[in-house]
Amino acid sequence: MLLHRHKSRVYTSIYLIVKDRYVAEDLLQDTFIKAVNVIKSGRYNEEGKFMPWLSRIAHNLAIDHFRSRKRHPQVTLEDGSRLFDSMEFAEDSFETIQLQQDTKSRLRSLIKDLPQEQKEVLIMRHYLQMSFQEIADHTEVSINTALGRMRYALINLRKKMSTNINAYDKNVYPTRSDEAPLPRNLGRGDKGD
């Protein structure tokens, strides 16, 4: 009943933002799925009007669509089919892959050097994707303490990463003590050339 009553207005508002019929249909579907899930879970507040609330969900989904499209551009043909799943059809270069591996390895070693409490919170948050409330419950500290540990962990990592940068372009080899300096005038041109 809600779908039949409001779908044309919601579809029009989405279409005016995205200007693509197929995307607007998908976002319309997502809007109503999200609305029904919120209503079923009992989180819908009946104090406000339904249509503005539904329009806000549709607007947010349209904005999220643009954000994801910016990260992963897609080409849609006239019939609605996608030319590529994403524009990332070319493989990364060896240098890019090596740099990513080096960065991950370096980050892991820097995380290992953090104080135990900071390391624990960082791992739970970013790798185990736990909420700060879950982290606080698991570590038996207040949520503010968990937030503070995370903050200090990130500050410490930033400091370590900025002072410990690998320089691929620079000469990282030490100079030899037995090297003889080259004379500036090698008999070709003026002195100092």
Image (cartoon, rainbow, N blue to C red):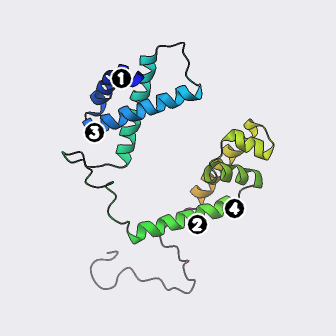
Tell me the kind of residue under disc 3: Tyr
Relative to 12, 124 lies left or right:
right
Label 4: element kind: helix
User: In front: mark 1 or mark 3?
Assistant: 1
User: In front: mark 1 or mark 4?
Assistant: 1
Residue for badge 1: 4
Instruction: Tell me which numbered mark, 1 or 3, is placed earlier along the sequence.
Output: 1
| Along the viewing direction, whichever of 180 and 27 lies nearer the viewer | 27
Q: Is residue 143 visible?
A: yes
The residue that appears at 62% across and 62% down in the rendered structure is 108
Label 1: element kind: helix
| Along the viewing direction, whichever of 164 and 69 lies nearer the viewer | 69
Q: In 3D space, how far apart are the residues under numbered discs 1 and 3 (Cα atoms)?
A: 19 Å
Query: Among all residues in the image, which is located at the extreme right?
Result: 140
Q: In 3D space, how far apart are the residues under numbered discs 2 and 4 (Cα atoms)?
A: 11 Å
Q: Is residue 169 visible?
A: no
Residue 193 position within the rendered picture, expressed as x and y whole percent measured from the top left: 31, 75
As for residue 122 lying within the magenta part, the answer is no
Q: Where 115 sits versus 183, above or below?
A: above
Residue for badge 4: 112
Q: Determine whether label 2 and label 4 are within 8 Å by CB.
A: no
Instruction: Tell me which numbered mark, 2 or 4, is placed earlier along the sequence.
Output: 2
